[in-house]
Image (tube, rainbow, N blue to C red):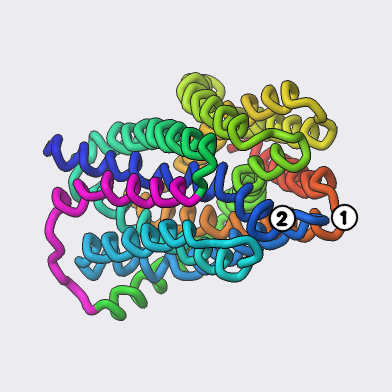
């Protein structure tokens, strides 16, 4: 096992977490909705929901094509560099935004988010290339853990700059953080070796995913799980992209308080994923999913009523515990449906469903917030996603 390649691969998680934490989750959502759009009567929520939903719709539609390119074309490192560069340039360009430039901010974020998600497709494709089979789980977990550390570091940098009022420098710091800590991947990953034509590999990947999806859809328990997973992960993703906006607008958190809150949530998510890993083996992943969805339902219900920062802090901490837990237990439960030797095709469909589950929830949240003028009513749509997912999972009690 080449430790330098492994460390370089893990470091990319450290790098891209700066984008996920600062741009997609915590600081930029508030800046865009409040400063650029002006969050009167939920208009900022509407535009932010549109931006997230549109970008993830494009990612969901194109991920099978890009997955085929990653698997069959042999130019994964070149494509990784291209998409990281696009994301870095778009994030740096956010520093030129001015109040009222809604469309420009919308387009820059959409393009940055698409490029970020596309880069992860090519990044993930390196894992089985550089890692022995018996170390795949461990190396994947190392990247996951280092990613949490990157989120904390980038949020601390962002907090310092926000306190100084230098929002433009926040976006520039994220772009530099992302690019600098991505450099080892570009130098250390194996060289590209062109195998098939670019378009042939894309079409091959699309056909591969579609054929697998059709076949898996005919299996009753798999179909029920995939529908449930689509619903409840859509709820989780909606919480992720709107939680900072909700905390700011509805509960009254300042930018500084938000950053500190989300740093703490990163710790609770990290601890939750480790603590409940043991219970997943003891109770079984389906039971842990059910308990997680009860927890998520309680969190979203509580968010409807919460008024104080203290109470919201408690809710956010519980959500952090449930975040890593539901992701890990869902993957473990889906693995129970996979026949030996079919891991690649099953998880290709699993990934496509996961990518598609960031479209409906953010869009509906933005629309409801805009129509009612209240985020409290919008949070009820998230509760509906969790309850629906829980009811479907309970139908699988014999699996």
Point out the image quarter for the C terminus. top right
Task: Identify which residue is drawn at 42% across, 43% down.
Answer: 18
Residue at the disc numbered 2? 45
Query: Residue 297, image x and y in percent?
Result: 74, 35
Say if the magenta span includes residue 299.
Answer: no
Nearer to me, 232 or 378: 378
Q: Quadrant of residue 56?
A: bottom right
Give the mark nearest the N terminus, 1 or 2. 2
**Residue furthest toward the right?**
372
Question: What kind of secondary structure does the magenta stretch mostly adopt?
Answer: helix
Query: Residue 2, image x and y in percent?
Result: 12, 38
Q: Quadrant of residue 85?
A: bottom left
Q: Is residue 285 something that shows in the picture?
A: no
Q: Against 361, is 66 above or below?
A: below
Q: Against 301, is 388 above or below?
A: below
Indicate left or right for 200 with 35 as reference.
Answer: left
Indicate left or right for 190 with 248 as reference.
Answer: left
Badge 1 marks a residue whose secondary structure is helix
Task: Identify which residue is drawn at 80% across, 58% down.
Answer: 370
Query: Residue 241, image x and y in percent?
Result: 61, 48
* Magenta stretch, residue numbers: 168-197
CB contact under 8 Å: marks 1 and 2? no
Q: Against 75, is 346 above or below?
A: above
Nearer to me, 117 or 38: 38
Say if the magenta span includes residue 176.
Answer: yes
Residue at the disc numbered 1? 372
Point out the image quarter for the N terminus. top left
Badge 2 marks a residue whose secondary structure is helix
């Amino acid at each position: 096992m080449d430790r330098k390649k492994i460390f370089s691969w893990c470091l990319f998680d450290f790098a891209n977490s700066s984008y996920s934490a600062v741009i997609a989750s915590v600081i930029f959502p508030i800046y865009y909705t409040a400063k650029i759009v002006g969050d009167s009567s939920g208009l900022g929520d509407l535009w932010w929901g549109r931006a997230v939903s549109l970008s993830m719709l494009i990612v969901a539609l194109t991920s099978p094509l890009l997955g085929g390119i990653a698997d069959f074309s042999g130019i994964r490192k070149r494509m990784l560099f291209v998409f990281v560069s696009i994301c870095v340039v778009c994030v740096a360009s956010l520093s030129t935004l001015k109040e009222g430039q809604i469309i420009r901010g919308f387009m820059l974020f959409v393009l940055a988010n698409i490029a970020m998600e596309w880069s992860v497709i090519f990044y993930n494709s390196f894992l089985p290339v550089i890692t022995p089979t018996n170390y795949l789980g461990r190396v994947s977990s190392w990247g996951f853990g280092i990613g949490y550390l990157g989120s904390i570091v980038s949020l601390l940098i962002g907090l310092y700059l926000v306190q100084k009022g230098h929002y433009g420098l926040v976006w520039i710091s994220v772009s530099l953080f992302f690019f600098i800590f991505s450099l080892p991947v570009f130098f250390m990953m194996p060289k590209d070796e062109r195998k098939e034509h670019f378009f042939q590999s894309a079409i091959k990947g699309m056909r591969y995913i579609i054929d697998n999806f059709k076949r898996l859809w005919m299996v009753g328990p798999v179909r029920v799980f995939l529908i449930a997973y689509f619903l409840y992960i859509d709820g989780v993703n909606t919480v992720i992209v709107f939680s900072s906006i909700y905390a700011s607008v509805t509960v009254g958190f300042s930018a500084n308080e938000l950053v500190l809150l989300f740093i703490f949530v990163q710790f609770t998510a990290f601890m939750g994923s480790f603590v409940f890993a043991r219970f997943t083996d003891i109770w079984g992943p389906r039971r842990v999913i059910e308990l997680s969805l009860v927890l998520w339902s309680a969190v979203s219900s509580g968010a409807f009523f919460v008024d104080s920062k203290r109470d919201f802090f408690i809710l956010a901490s519980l959500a952090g515990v449930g975040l890593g837990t539901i992701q890990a237990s869902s993957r473990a439960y889906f693995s129970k449906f996979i026949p030996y030797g079919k891991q690649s095709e099953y998880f290709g469909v699993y990934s496509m469903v996961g990518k598609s589950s960031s479209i409906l929830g953010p869009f509906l949240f933005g629309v409801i917030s805009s129509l009612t003028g209240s985020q409290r009513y919008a949070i009820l749509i998230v509760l509906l996603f969790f309850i629906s997912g829980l009811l479907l999972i309970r139908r699988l009690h014999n699996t």
